[in-house]
Image (tube, coloured by chain):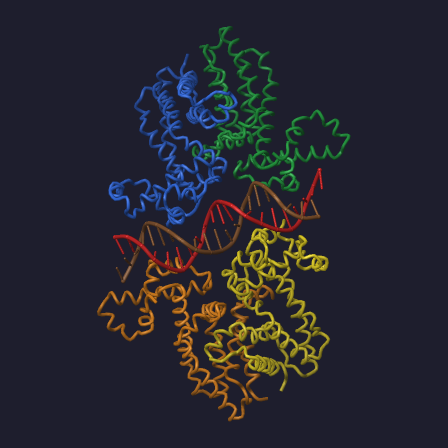
Chain colours: A green, B blue, C orange, D yellow, E brown, F red
Amino acid sequence: MRSIHHLVNYLTMANSAAAVADPRTRDADRTQQEILAAAMDEFAERGLGGARIDSIAERAGVNKRLIYYYFGGKDELFLAVLEQTYGDIREAERALHLELTDPADAVRRLVAFTWNHYLAHPEFLTLLNSENLHRARHLKQSKRIREMNSPLIQTLGDVLERGRRKGVFRGGVDPVHLYISIAGLSYFYLSNNHTLSTIFARDLMAPKALSERLSHITEVVMGYVLLN
Amino acid sequence: MRSIHHLVNYLTMANSAAAVADPRTRDADRTQQEILAAAMDEFAERGLGGARIDSIAERAGVNKRLIYYYFGGKDELFLAVLEQTYGDIREAERALHLELTDPADAVRRLVAFTWNHYLAHPEFLTLLNSENLHRARHLKQSKRIREMNSPLIQTLGDVLERGRRKGVFRGGVDPVHLYISIAGLSYFYLSNNHTLSTIFARDLMAPKALSERLSHITEVVMGYVLLN
Amino acid sequence: MRSIHHLVNYLTMANSAAAVADPRTRDADRTQQEILAAAMDEFAERGLGGARIDSIAERAGVNKRLIYYYFGGKDELFLAVLEQTYGDIREAERALHLELTDPADAVRRLVAFTWNHYLAHPEFLTLLNSENLHRARHLKQSKRIREMNSPLIQTLGDVLERGRRKGVFRGGVDPVHLYISIAGLSYFYLSNNHTLSTIFARDLMAPKALSERLSHITEVVMGYVLLN
Amino acid sequence: MRSIHHLVNYLTMANSAAAVADPRTRDADRTQQEILAAAMDEFAERGLGGARIDSIAERAGVNKRLIYYYFGGKDELFLAVLEQTYGDIREAERALHLELTDPADAVRRLVAFTWNHYLAHPEFLTLLNSENLHRARHLKQSKRIREMNSPLIQTLGDVLERGRRKGVFRGGVDPVHLYISIAGLSYFYLSNNHTLSTIFARDLMAPKALSERLSHITEVVMGYVLLN
DNA sequence: CATGAATGAGGTTTCATTCAT
DNA sequence: GATGAATGAAACCTCATTCAT
């Protein structure tokens, strides 16, 4: 393992204050961020296999060699991108504060959030597809990501339990399955929109189609969890 | 035009009986079938970009040159695989005869069929992911595939209408959205099982998990379409 | 050497009468002619190295294997084309009957003939370029072609001598050099017309340009051979 | 854009002095020069189609990959060679200073120069043949080459006009046609020497034959332009 | 006479990565 | 901290030619 700079640098914004004191470190930080952003675009557009180190360097406006210096190699760079992407979504999920919300509203909010997040971050879908094509090879090496997910499932479980006790939700709902369903209802539509639009001869990304989709999946999910 | 042999050949099993009799005979049909089968495996395992022509040739036990002879190139081969894959699923869908079935049973049957088909044909998921990564570039060139899908949506629309008239289904359900939801509930779980299993620290492919999943998605879908 | 059919067949039209009796032989003749014609086009368009056996077979509408059957291989085919091409021009030159013509007219006629022949048979130029790129490798194997040329040089020498005795031509003109000059004045213009037209930003193949060229080279040659 | 390095580099000999000092230094300039020189040899010997990138790399003593790094591909490399070749001849033509010379001497000098240049640079002939086989495909992309030629034609036009006013040259001579004739008289003889030598059974490249040829073409050209 | 099937050698090009400064 | 130069392995694809009928 050549360099773990990134494990330290791009995750901790804490020390950026100190970094200001030393402009070189500051540049190093920014350079790494630019590489990461460029890599995310490239991986999202072409997948892990199709991404080109040259292209990432060009997008980032840095010398190719720097990528190796900071991240070690293509796979490590991909993992760094994955970590950042997962980090972003988990952080956003936390900000939903489902634990403070009325159960039915909480589920609606999670559905809408998931849909909107995927819509705003199509790179997340592509990255996950790539990672699954590789059997989660990178993810399995990342203790950080593995530890990231628990909170939401826990929270969703609590929401379901509150709803059940309140008499509005059905019982026996596995929060993991529900979470996967909520994700899947958005994911498949957006991730496969090119083939689906082609086959159904219908532009699934048109604004009207998108708002209809959100209504549809909300109804599907609520139809399932709500009693009556 | 050499490369349309497969359009004719791989669909006609007519003379394959004779071919089986003498495995050593030069048999263009069987050779193409073997190439297609090998290509499907390779593309499914590694994606379009990661697949290797050499590897496909080796798997098929044929000279690499033959792949170009029969299919023209990697992209055309990928399209041929896509066509076969889509053909298979469409044919299986037709065999469901949803139009002759009680509406609620028809939806349940479609859900179960979709789940089981994806489970039995994981290559379909990977191929679709690859094709979407490439923005349906191949699919758009295939008139055959574009014409394949209409029947099922039509049938599903009829089922929904019958259920509504019968007073058991809610109205206003778009069959395209419902179809995408049914697919998405299975697809996401299976296609992303590696990352999901890792993150949730739970083997989503264990037999028990699988049967639970089918129950879950059936309940989700029926909870949505059924009144009450 | 696999087959010398062509050495016998395509050159002797004598036995075609007999061939009529046997339709198979007749077809064989025609097939070889078609291959030769297709090969000439292909070699002319792409050169020896750029020509494709597949393409020749397709142009000729025959199975690729037949080319090998009749001609043995690419090089032998190229030689056959060369032989036919040389044969055509030599035969046309003989038909000029320069030996019966007034010396000045004879030279003018040769100039015009050469120009018009190259213009009508651009393939000749390309074939010669290819053959020279290969250092006349094929030509050197063809006793037939080597024997073809003498007559014209002999005739041109006689013309020059007649002109000199008549007091209209300068003396000391080497017919070989003159012949090469006459050819070169046409050849270079036509063979290199693509680069020349590009560099001089002037369409050298426009009808007007062509007729001007013939006038020009006639004047150049006559200005040289005529006294005064 | 990497592939325009050569447009800048191979024309500037500025720092090559330092490079010569240490043959082991990494020197992009020299490497490109070596690739260009090797490419010129290979293209001249085998034509564009027959040239092998492997062979060029070997001749240049560089890694094959570097050719793509600096030039982009075979076609771009060929164009770079063409540009250098054209640049060389145009520069040499400029050095003739025909505009300062007596008209008749100027034409004689141009004839001799052209002959000697083609003789000394047989690669020029082959390259042009290749480029014409490809219908000036590369040349048309090169603004640099298209702009190179005007000066000489202009100068030759001035020479002809001076000669005419002086009463020694005939009028109405198109400098483009004359230039093409001067070139053609040398070009055809040298470019086609292999077939011509074979057919005429006469070694056209023997020293005596060469000097005779120069005399001959000089007489042809002067016989045309001079009055009387 | 004729042909579709098949192949080995080799071609151009790509790419992640390392070298040397 | 940063960079241009360089590379080996391997990818896709092409082509003249032969096989089997």
Decide if residue A20 is in sight here: yes
> In the rendered image of this protein, does residue C145 appear above or below residue C172?
above
Q: Residue at x 50, y 88 (%)?
A: C160
Examine the image and state in which quarter residue C65 appears: bottom left
Nearer to us in this view, D222 or A212 = D222
Quadrant housing the C terminus of chain C: bottom right
Q: How many marks?
A: 0
Nearer to us in this view, D136 or D9 = D9
Residue farthest to the right? A21
Examine the image and state in which quarter residue B98 appears: top left
Horizontally, residue A109 falls left or right of residue C4, namely right
What x and y, as percent, mark residue D136?
55, 62
Q: Residue at x 63, y 83 (%)?
A: D226
Residue farthest to the left? C21
Decide if residue D174 is in sight here: no
Horizontally, residue D186 falls left or right of residue B1, namely right
What x and y, as percent, mark residue A137?
51, 30
What x and y, as percent, mark residue C107?
49, 83
What x and y, as percent, mark residue A186?
50, 25
Q: Residue at x 60, y 25 (%)?
A: A87
Quadrant housing the N terminus of chain C: bottom left
Examine the image and state in which quarter residue D56 appears: bottom right
> In the rendered image of this protein, does residue C170 appear above or below residue D114?
below
Nearer to us in this view, A32 or D187 = A32
Q: Residue at x 46, y 71 (%)?
A: C136
Horizontally, residue A199 falls left or right of residue D131, namely left
